[in-house]
């Protein structure tokens, strides 16, 4: 299991991302936290946690992005500021849902390292949340979401959409498919570690996201080679030993966290099977 120090690395990165490159560095901080919880919450094989720790150490831990924050007295009451700031920045769809993905992971980490709930940390997180801009997204047909409180039904809905989304975007990159998973998992995390009412409010942005992916590729979506089928998956050490793919923004950590989080909530064997057959396209 990755130690809490790795959660602090991620929180430090999120705290100062608004001063650097809010989008890219926000991705990196969120990826570090997602990597920790991917290892903690899934049946990863021996050596996976250590390998992911080494990836974080090599790429981010020793950089200024993850450097320690000033020593301050923690104040658990400040956590409400992060929840309130998230609630204030939920209108529309904001940069593929990162206005929800980022604070949900931060709130989850702060639950485990409450000593990091300081004025500097909370102020930086709120500054970052406010950076994510509303996207101009054309709407497709209306979308009805299952209740978020019905975890299995909601997860199955998302995984079914994921399978369809991957097929729509064949050859055009799978960023929309991957963030469909991380956005959905963020709603669950926000409900548990933030506020159920704010999570329900955030679901309106997710509804817009689903409308967008149902439109399929737009002129702004580039063309990319598709991933080949895998012999090993993120639960396996061999997958991380091979280390194929771009770790620059940390999607290789965020996507497995979202995917396996939803898989764990799914009851329908057919939906789970299709998702597992499709998952190599984002891994």
Image (spheres, rainbow, N blue to C red):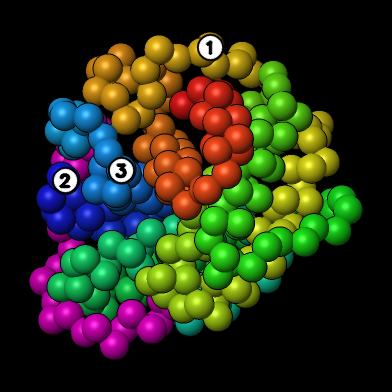
Question: Across the whole image, how many numbered discs are drawn on residues?
Answer: 3
Q: Quadrant of residue 1?
A: top left
Residue at the (23%, 77%) spot, across then down? 118
Q: Residue farthest to the right? A: 141
The residue to which callout 3 is attached is 42
- Residue 75: give x, y in percent of width and height: 21, 84
- Residue 49: give x, y in percent of width and height: 19, 36
Q: Secondary structure at mark 3?
A: loop
- Residue 239: give x, y in percent of width and height: 32, 20
- Residue 83: give x, y in percent of width and height: 44, 78
The residue to which callout 1 is attached is 228
Q: Mark 1 or mark 2, which is nearer the start of the sequence?
A: 2
In the image, is residue 79 part of the stretch drawn in magenta? yes
* Side of 251 where 146 appears, left or right: right
Residue at the (35%, 29%) spot, across then down? 234
Q: Quadrant of residue 243?
A: top left
Disc 1 packing (10 Å; few <14; some 14–19; many ≥20) = few
Residue 220 appears in the figure = yes
Q: Residue farthest to the bottom? A: 77
Label 2 – label 3 distance at C-alpha:
13 Å
Depth check, mark 3 against mark 1: the one in front is 3
In the image, is residue 71 part of the stretch drawn in magenta? yes
> What segment is highlighted magenta in the picture?
54-83
- Main secondary structure found in the magenta portion: helix
Residue 183 appears in the figure = no
* Side of 19 where 172 appears, left or right: right
């Amino acid at each position: 299991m990755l130690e809490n120090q790795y959660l602090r690395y991620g929180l430090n990165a999120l705290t100062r991302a608004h001063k650097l490159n809010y989008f890219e560095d926000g991705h990196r901080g969120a990826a570090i936290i997602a990597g920790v919880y991917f290892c903690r919450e899934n049946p990863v094989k021996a050596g996976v946690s250590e390998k992911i720790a080494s990836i974080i150490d090599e790429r981010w831990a020793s950089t200024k992005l993850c450097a320690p924050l000033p020593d301050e007295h923690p104040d658990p009451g400040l956590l409400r500021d992060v929840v309130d700031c998230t609630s204030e920045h939920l209108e529309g769809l904001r940069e593929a849902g990162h206005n929800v993905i980022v604070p949900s992971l931060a709130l989850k980490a702060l639950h485990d390292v409450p000593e990091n709930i300081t004025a500097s940390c909370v102020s930086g997180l709120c500054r970052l949340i406010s950076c994510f801009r509303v996207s101009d997204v054309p709407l497709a047909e209306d979308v009805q979401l299952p209740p978020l409180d019905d975890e299995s039904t909601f997860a199955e809905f998302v995984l079914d959409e994921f399978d369809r989304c991957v097929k729509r975007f064949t050859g055009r990159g799978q960023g929309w498919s991957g963030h469909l998973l991380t956005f959905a998992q963020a709603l669950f995390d926000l409900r548990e570690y933030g506020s159920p009412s704010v999570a329900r409010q955030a679901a309106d942005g997710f509804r817009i996201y689903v409308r967008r992916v149902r439109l399929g590729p737009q002129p702004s979506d580039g063309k990319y080679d598709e991933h080949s089928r895998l012999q090993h998956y993120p639960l396996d050490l061999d997958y991380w030993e091979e280390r194929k793919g771009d770790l620059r923004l940390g999607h290789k950590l965020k996507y497995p966290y979202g995917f396996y989080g939803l898989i764990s909530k799914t009851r329908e064997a057919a939906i789970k099977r299709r998702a597992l057959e499709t998952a190599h396209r984002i891994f």
